[in-house]
Amino acid sequence: MKNLLSLFSLGLIFLLSNCQNPSPQETKQNKLALNNSPEEVAAPNPSETNFEIMMDHQLYFTGADNREVYFMARIKGGADTVERDRPPLNISLVLDRSGSMESERKLEKAKEAVLMVLNHLKGEDQYSLVSYDHMVTVDQPSGKIQNKSAVQAKIKAIRSGGSTNLSGGMLEGYNQVKNTKIEKAVNRVLLLSDGLANQGITEPSELQKIVQSKFDQESMAISTFGVGSDFNEDLMTNLAEYGRGNYYFIDSPDDIPAIFKKELDGLLSVVAQNTQLTINFPNNQLELEKVYGYEASINDNEIRIPFNDVFAEEEKVVLVKFRLKDDISGSLNFKGQLQYDDVLNGYTRKEEILELEMKATSDKVAYEESANKEVLKNIVAFTAVQNVEQVALLIDQGKYDEARALMQENIQFMESNPLYDISLDSTLSKQLIDYKDYSESLEDVEVMEAAERSSMQKANKMKNYEYEKKKRK
């Protein structure tokens, strides 16, 4: 049993082949057997993207008191330690210039961020600048930068005024990226706003459909940056989520350049592109209840999650909750398939297939001893994130007593849950501290000014988003 637990603590990691020359596709398939010894699993190579899958237990319990089964997949981008030519950027910066951007020097700081991005670009990069209020202006059409001084002058000349046609600016940003889209480039729109969309397309569901379509059909992603207390953080989060980019809340205008630098650093360190995870599960034996971590498409016994770009040393974790069907028997078989273009190894199209088998047991002691602590830890983390999402929703709805009660239940769940001792993990401990701080802020939520309450909500939703995406350590 000790060997079994050691195997799972290593994460069942299988290395991808290291190929210097591009090939149509490179596939590696592994069957994970329960009696493998730890010595049979190679240590991960830090310079390669690593993929692992695991279950909450090696065995599933046939008793009536626990019908849940959890599957977890984890991808970690390789360390970008080799000297190489990075993928070219093809980016469009879409800048809100509405009247509210003049306050607190928001527009000035946004322009400073745009200038910073410009200074990090190389000759092969494609760049465009779009600004919008109720009207949309292409300040710099997409293309390679020939004269930085001229582009800098255009950036500095942008002035504020008018309302917020967010959809118009966003769509023009996509158009600019599409105009210069090339193979192997990092194609992304960077959208900044400080207010509510009140011109053009304003319905959040319609905007969400647009970004999802742009990614699914044209492989163009979007990252969003919300500034201050007046923008719709749920909309901006969903645009990034369905557009397969990143979301940032910027509380202080002074932080705009640093947050843009954070996104830019990621874009400059892409190690895998066109990344997709596929999970196959026995739907005749299991009911799918929830996918945690990322939006997924589900078809019969298949779950698909397109991750898009993976940055160097970036971790992506997906947790899937299933429920055992009645009268279940036999083994449960799962398959995880990861496909991506390996930027560090000549853009080879890599495919790795990992398979897992769970056997049945009626012995509760054997079941409990087969637990995988790494999965149990993530069950606690993702469940807590989901609970706090519900707390934030209740606050937005003005249901303050319900929100406070749920927040206390969530804190108790983290402190005394039987799955995992959170004191063993620094990130979980920090997550609990942040949730306790949020709980304290809810004590006087009724008497807060609207702007104060809005900023509180945005800050805590951002932290929760970072815990869900494994960005907050």
Image (cartoon, rainbow, N blue to C red):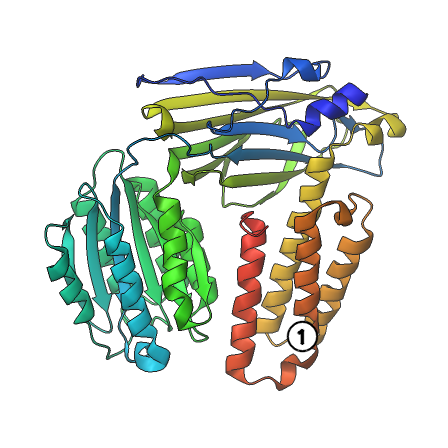
**Neighbourhood count class around disc 1 (C-alpha, 10 Å): few under 14, some 14–19, many 20 upward:** many
Callout 1 amino acid: Leu
Q: Is residue 4 left or right of residue 298?
A: right
Q: Position of residue 334 (x, y in %)?
A: 61, 24
Residue at image position (71%, 46%) is 425
Quick check: can you spot residue 137?
no
Image: 444 above or below 337: below
Tag 1 residue: 442
Residue at image position (86%, 25%) is 366
In which quadrant is the N terminus drawn? Answer: top right
Residue at image position (75%, 45%) is 424
Q: Position of residue 188 (x, y in %)?
A: 30, 48
Image: 116 above or below 405: above
Choose top left, top right, bottom left or bottom right for residue 384: bottom right
Numbered disc 1: secondary structure = helix
Q: Is residue 368 left or right of residue 201?
A: right
